[in-house]
Amino acid sequence: MKYDFSTEIPRQGTSTIKYDKRELIFGNDKVIPMWVADMDIATPPFIIERLQKRLQHPILGYTLQDDEYNNSIAWWLQKRFGWQIETTWLSYCPGIVAGLNHAVQAYTNPGDKVLIQSPVYHPFYYAVKQNGRELLTNPLVLTNGKYQIDFEDFEAKLSQGVKLFILCSPHNPVGRVWTTDELNRMADLCLKHKVLIVADEIHADLVFEPNKHIPFATLSPEVANKTITFGSASKTFNIAGLATAWIAISNTQLLKRYNLQAQRNGTWHGNIFGFEATKAAYSPQGEEWLEQLLWYLAENTSLVRNFLEAELPKVKLVEPEGTYLLWLDFREYNLSNDELKKLLVEKAGIGLNEGEMFGEEGSGFQRMNIACPSQTVSLALQKIKDAFCDL
Ligand SMILES: Cc1ncc(COP(=O)(O)O)c(C=O)c1O
């Protein structure tokens, strides 16, 4: 079946963050919203049908993580990444941000050191700091248009007594899909310094050829034993509003500690619609839809690349290997972050994520969400060009 990703779907007035918070965030409810990471692309019809079917039953009481749900996750991980899990390794959380907080609470004590790689998805900072842990960063280094890991700094930081490393794989916002070699080097250093790894793999499905997502826990049994992996169908299938994510932990002690923390926080029971949607998503139909989505996202990325090269050469695209979030480098304009934001919001009428929110290394950058109909991408690019043409 051929799916449609190009139809514009009005979302304003559906209590959606991306549209209905524009006035609050940008001071203007007309900006083209290319910020928060969900898609202006319809959730696949087979997921909607599954939810409609469930709604034919008139009771929406407490639900459980049943065999079909667990098996659908195991099937997907095996099929897409060759990762053979046991369904007993799985647990639930109402979104990965909640899970990251549980993990920090479960595996570290107040004052312990936690390492992240900046610039990175901003709730990583909150999960560390708001739980009273000490934040250490291993800044990624932009070399010839590509972000790389500074391994010397990584080890220097680990050796300061870090207890937990939170990995973003694939990486939001810089779009890297870490290679086996990079993952192995990080894993070896974590094992050497006895550091646990939380791998946030929410963007695992959104990877462009020839890059391949390698689940961190598949590197070796020793690495699996120290790894807590988070995943979800939410980004891939546009179901983030269902607040459902999974955790896979093969080490039974670590799993127990995670579950105890989830219990303390009162978040162990799930969402009927999140479970139903995930079962429909992690299926052969889901694969077929995903392949078409990836093609569409790659086309939108090409649109941006070609436009910038021809029309706005001072804006540099950091070539994404994965995710639908483009990391745009505006530093050649020598503008302050406020000036840059003002131009984009007030003159161009575009709502992006300011790079600085992902860490100080993001200063001068903006994150653009291109998971939308291609005509929206084209319109946004034209508006940016018109706003920046005199600079
Ligand atoms: C790396 C990363 N982790 C987690 C999330 C959010 O996860 P959830 O909605 O399941 O809390 C996002 C959303 O953009 C993300 O990019």
Image (cartoon, rainbow, N blue to C red):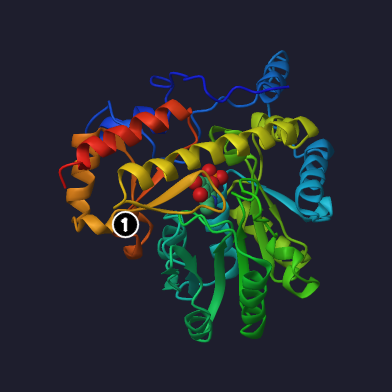
- Tell me: residue 231, above or below residue 65: below
- Tell me: residue 264, above or below residue 108: above
In the shown orientation, is residue 158 left or right of residue 69? left
Residue 305 picture location, percent across and down: 43, 45
Residue 125 picture location, percent across and down: 42, 61
Residue with the mark numbered 1: 356
Q: Residue furthest front?
A: 310
For ligand 1, tell me if the residue under mark 1 lies within 8 Å. Answer: no
Task: Identify the residue at horizontal 58%, vertical 56% (top origin).
Answer: 170
Residue 210 picture location, percent across and down: 66, 54
Q: Quadrant of residue 303?
A: top left
Residue situated in front as seen by the camera: 274 or 121: 121
In the shown orientation, is residue 357 left or right of residue 300? left
Residue situated in front as seen by the camera: 335 or 37: 335
The answer to whether one can see residue 21 in this image is: no
The answer to whether one can see residue 93 in this image is: yes
Task: Identify the residue at horizontal 72%, vertical 64% (top origin).
Answer: 217
Residue situated in front as seen by the camera: 274 or 81: 81
Task: Identify the residue at horizontal 75%, vertical 40% (top origin).
Answer: 65
Q: Residues within 10 Å of mark 1 (few under 14, many from 20)?
A: some
Task: Identify the residue at horizontal 30%, vertical 45% (top origin).
Answer: 312
